[in-house]
């Protein structure tokens, strides 16, 4: 045992002084990059837990000043926030489920060499990434389908993204051998059974990529809701937060100076509190999907 350890140590490559100096500067550079990326997040969180006067006067730098939960109290004291959270969860869960299902059903057949006309279909899919019908035609399509002021307006029009289809198709081409599909076909396995029992269990990385991409897109979406939804009861969280910020930054000329100052301070505080409220679900989900996300992105986009 001792000899094995000594042999392993002797086989260990010794770094030269030049390599050590190089690695030192690499780690130093990465440390500064980490600070540049991390500081805005720390600043936003610290500002959200500070007093309105401290935030408005610029006293917050790294840690909360005059610790206060007033921003969150005002935010969650608004019943529209709870409604917006529930709506965003609904759109995110069901929108992601619909999008991932449709993307897999499109991408997997296109990855099979036996599909007739798959190259022509891919040309049409890529074509949609270059040319877009426009806002007015899209609105007219949604209106004629009867989806205005309904939840379907946020679930169907943006259900499939061409880029996600390309990534998933490349992953299936690289990771699912044609021989595996041929062997399953010889055993009498149908295409849907093969997709459900073989392909999907082997495709966890790309499924995690698709889920994360579509979920983040659905959670942050507000423009489609602004166009298609009239009822406030259907508004997602991002649109509710936008309305609250606009309402708190709008001042009247008849207000007293002290009231105007207090309202502006509260608007500055709410800005940071609402950023934390809107970003927290995504920040909580990402660490669990990061491993699959990185692996799926590498296999789905670099190879093939």
Image (tube, helix red, strand yellow):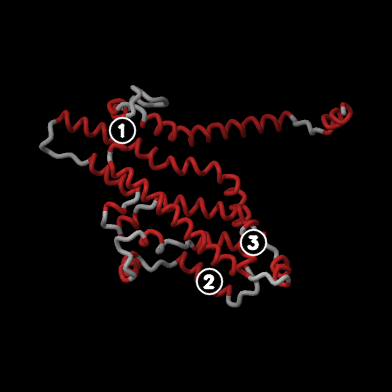
Distance in Å between CA atoms under marks 3 and 2: 30 Å
Q: Which residue is mark 3?
A: 197
Label 1 or label 2, whichever lies nearer to me, is: 1
Q: Residue furthest bottom?
A: 116
Q: Earlier in the sequence, mark 3 or mark 1?
A: 1
Q: Which residue is mark 1?
A: 73
Q: Earlier in the sequence, mark 1 or mark 2?
A: 1
Task: Choose between 81 and 216: the one closer to the eye.
Answer: 81
For the N terminus, which image quadrant? top right
The disc placed on residue 285 is none
Image quadrant assignment for residue 110: bottom right
Circle 3 residues within 10 Å: few <14, some 14–19, many ≥20: few
Q: Earlier in the sequence, mark 3 or mark 2?
A: 2
Give left or right: position of 142 versus 189.
left
Circle 2 residues within 10 Å: few <14, some 14–19, many ≥20: few
Q: Which residue is mark 2?
A: 123
Q: Residue furthest top?
A: 66
Image quadrant assignment for residue 200: bottom right
Please report the residue visible at 56 percent of the width from the left and 46 percent of the height from the top.
289
Task: Choose between 41 and 154: the one closer to the eye.
Answer: 154
Distance in Å between CA atoms under marks 3 and 1: 48 Å
Give the secondary structure at mark 1.
helix
Marks 3/1 in contact by CB < 8 Å: the verdict is no
Label 3 or label 2, whichever lies nearer to me, is: 3
Circle 1 residues within 10 Å: few <14, some 14–19, many ≥20: few
Task: Choose between 32 and 99: the one closer to the eye.
Answer: 99
């Amino acid at each position: 045992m001792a000899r094995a350890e000594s042999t392993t140590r002797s086989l260990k490559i010794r770094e030269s002084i030049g390599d050590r100096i190089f690695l030192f500067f690499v780690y130093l550079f990465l440390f500064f990059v980490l600070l540049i990326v991390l500081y805005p997040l720390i600043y936003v969180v610290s500002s959200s837990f500070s007093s309105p006067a401290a935030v408005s006067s610029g006293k917050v730098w790294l840690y909360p000043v005059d610790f206060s939960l007033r921003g969150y109290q005002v935010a969650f004291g608004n019943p529209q926030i709870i409604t917006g959270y529930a709506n965003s969860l609904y759109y995110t869960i069901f929108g992601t489920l619909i999008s991932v299902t449709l993307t897999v059903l499109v991408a997997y057949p296109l990855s099979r060499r036996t599909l007739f006309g798959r190259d022509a279909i891919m040309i049409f899919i890529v074509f949609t990434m270059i040319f877009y019908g426009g806002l007015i035609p899209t609105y007219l399509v949604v209106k004629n389908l009867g989806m205005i002021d309904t939840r379907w307006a946020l679930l169907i029009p943006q259900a499939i993204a061409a880029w996600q289809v390309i990534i998933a198709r490349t992953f299936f081409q690289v990771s699912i051998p044609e021989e595996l599909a041929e062997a399953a076909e010889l055993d009498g396995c149908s295409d849907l059974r093969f997709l459900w029992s073989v392909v999907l269990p082997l495709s966890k990385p790309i499924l995690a990529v698709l889920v994360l991409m579509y979920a983040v897109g659905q959670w942050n979406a507000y423009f489609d809701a602004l166009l298609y939804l009239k009822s406030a009861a259907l508004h997602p969280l991002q649109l509710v937060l936008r309305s609250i910020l606009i309402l708190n930054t709008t001042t009247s000329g008849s207000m007293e100076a002290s009231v105007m100052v207090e309202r502006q301070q509260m608007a500055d505080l709410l800005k940071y509190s609402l950023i934390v409220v809107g970003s927290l679900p995504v920040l909580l989900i990402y660490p669990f999907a990061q491993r699959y996300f990185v692996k799926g992105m590498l296999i789905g986009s670099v190879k093939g």
